[in-house]
Amino acid sequence: MEDLSKLIESARQAFAEATQPAALEDAKAKFLGKSGTLTTMMKGLRDLAADQRKAAGAEINAAKRAVEEALNARREALAQAALEKKLAEEAIDVTLPGRTSPAGGIHPVIRTWMRIEEIFRSIGFDVASGPEIENDWYTFTALNNPLNHPARSMQDTFYVDMKDEKGLLLPLRPHTSPMQVRYSRTHKPPIKVIAPGRTYRVDSDATHSPMFHQVEGLWLGENISFADLKGVYSMFLRRFFETDDLIVRFRPSYFPFTEPSVEVDMMFTTGSRKGKWLEISGAGEVHPTVVRNYGLDPEQYCGFAFGSGLERLTMLRYGIDDLRLFFEGDLRFLRQFNE
């Protein structure tokens, strides 16, 4: 019978030379496989005399255990080496700065929205919001727009494929003015409210967008005059632009929902924009018919309303000359408002 100590040493040597799990299994087959040396020796026991078989079997089993221990030790060594290699390849240098997700920022138009709310809340105005899909009555009729008014045309107003109880298509609101009516029909005078929100019109160029933001303002009471409009809106502009170096002009105009009506212009008196009149808002005293549509008596209650574009105010505040930049999602443009 082959010297078992030499066989054990040979197995250990073969296992040590195996650098991959597959090579180790090949070496195992040489000693412990179906045709392996130790397996063949176990089969040969039947050819020995009975008195020799027991002693030889014990020696072979002891050798087999020694070979299996060497095999398992090598398997563990290869597994540990593979783990250490993987950990080394995926190692994290804890001395490096951590990788963080970039913080989000507030869009410049939303900054304007928040600033307007803050200013008007400080002087007692509520903030209201309403539906962006309106009906014809709140959008046009209640605001004293005649049936043939061009604003009702598909050329100016977006409509959705839904109809109200009168069979009229529902418009996407072209202004936030319907909130004048909605709010006034559910609140008692005196009423002081602004209604910022998204609006929609068929228009698109460097200074217009099919979707834009507007803020509607309404102050209604028993003795609210045009002088109050001038005082409130002039104060708002000075606080919004954080300067007293501007002039506000109220230029006669026409809107069906106000009488008298004005366009509000402003002009900076210092800086690079000095000396140029800029249109800011439409405004005026609420038309008696509109007050009546509020469910109120125009002989008792009067007041003013205004509507201003948030994009226009944002462009003037930050010196932006193309409204489309607000909607293109270019992070290079947006990040400068959050640095």
Image: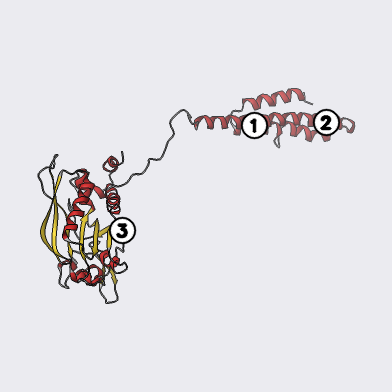
Judge from the rendering whether residue 46 lies leftward or rightward of residue 152; answer left or right: right
Q: Tag on residue 178? A: none
Q: Nearer the viewer, residue 207 or 224?
A: 224
- Whole-percent x and y of residue 113? 28, 51
Q: Quadrant of the N terminus?
A: top right
Q: Quadrant of the C terminus?
A: top left
Nearest to viewer (mark 3 / mark 1): 3
Q: Tag on residue 58? A: 2
Could you tell which of marks 3 and 2 lies nearer the N-terminus?
Answer: 2
Query: What residue is shown at x 33% (from left), y 44% (from top)?
Result: 105
Three-letter residue code for mark 2: Ala
Q: Tag on residue 126? A: 3
Q: Quadrant of residue 332?
A: top left
Could you tell which of marks 2 and 1 lies nearer the N-terminus?
Answer: 2
* Residue identified by numbered label 1: 76
Q: What is the distance, in whole Å, between disc 3 and disc 1 at their CAs?
A: 73 Å
Three-letter residue code for mark 1: Glu
Q: What is the distance, in whole Å, between disc 2 and disc 1 at their CAs?
A: 27 Å
